Amino acid sequence: MYKKKAMTSEKASYVRRRGHLDAKDFAKSIGLDDDYLNDPKAKKDVIDKSGDSYSVKSGEKKWQIFLYSERRFRRDYSFMAMNGVGQLLLKCIQCFPGSFRKYSEHKKLYKNNLQQPMIKLCNKLRDKKRLAAFIDKAMFNSGEVNYLAIKHENKFHIFWSRDVIGILSDNLRAENSQARTTKQNPNQKVVFKIDKTYGEIEMRNDSEIHYREVKFWLNKKLVVNLLLGKIKKVYNYSDNVLVYGEAIKRFGRWKE
């Protein structure tokens, strides 16, 4: 059975540098200087002259929306107030022992333990309003970030956060993963699908460095195509910046 390789530290470092350079490129594209305001510890990659904030996504295949440990969920009250979602994410983490060595000795046992909280988490996220709240928190920190700016085919595509949340939550459906072989365990993930897999919530337990962490990722190409297919109104702000949907009314307020 083929097993996906975990991203190396060198690759992860490259991805972070690439993301930072793309954020700087976007900042310049909307008229900011090199010393644009940003918050590296939050979802705000760029803040424009009117004070509006952007999550800037590039990448070729996947976006890592978050990779959080038990401590993060315990300290983030928004997750804990999401009608049981935060508590279930904690239960997923707590299915695994504190020691990576102990987990390595009994992997199948602990993966079996994960099935029930993953099933319950999936059932929670089948509710469209709760899924919308989860996407809002995960991608935009519950309304803190105003726009999603995607670098795609050497242009930046700007979407209003509410448009993104509405389209994703209305169209994606939550399912649990299935075992493809007798060696695999079912119900190890929450999978977001339409016709294909658009993203997943999964446990990351691949090393002592990345252990007992919850990862949420989305497929860039599929999400971009979904947004472009659902939003027909587009405004050419410049040669390399396109603005869509509700964002057209709001973007560029610093010029008013």
Image: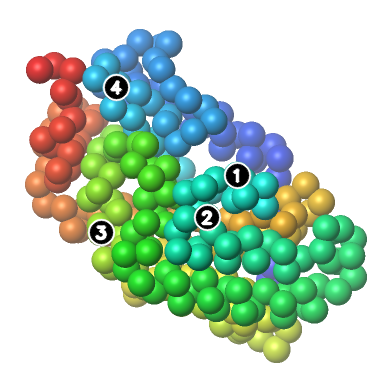
Q: Amino acid at mark 4?
A: Gly
Q: Amino acid at mark 1?
A: Arg
Give the quadrant of the N terminus.
bottom right
> Which dot marks residue 167?
3
Q: Earlier in the sequence, mark 3 or mark 1?
A: 1
Classed neighbour count for the residue bearing mark 3: other residues with Cα under 10 Å, few (<14), some (14–19), many (≥20): some
Nearer mark to the viewer, of 3 and 2: 2
Q: Amino acid at mark 2?
A: Met
Q: Earlier in the sequence, mark 2 or mark 1?
A: 1
- Residue at point 34%, 33% (across, down): 54
**Element at label 1:** helix
Q: CA distance from mark 2 to mark 1?
A: 9 Å
- Label 4 with label 2: CB-CB less than 8 Å: no
Quadrant hosting residue 155: top left
> Which dot marks residue 51?
4
Q: Earlier in the sequence, mark 3 or mark 4?
A: 4
Q: CA distance from mark 4 to mark 1?
A: 27 Å
Task: Give the camera-side residue of 82 and 187.
Answer: 82
Residue 253 in sight in this render: yes
> Label 2: which residue?
80
Please say if 75 is above or below 237. below
- Where residue 25 appears, as percent x and y from the top left, is 38, 23
Q: Earlier in the sequence, mark 4 or mark 2?
A: 4
Classed neighbour count for the residue bearing mark 2: other residues with Cα under 10 Å, few (<14), some (14–19), many (≥20): some
**Element at label 3:** helix
Q: Amino acid at mark 3?
A: Ile
> Label 1: which residue?
75
Q: How many marks?
A: 4
- Residue at point 42%, 69% (across, down): 125
Nearer mark to the viewer, of 3 and 1: 1
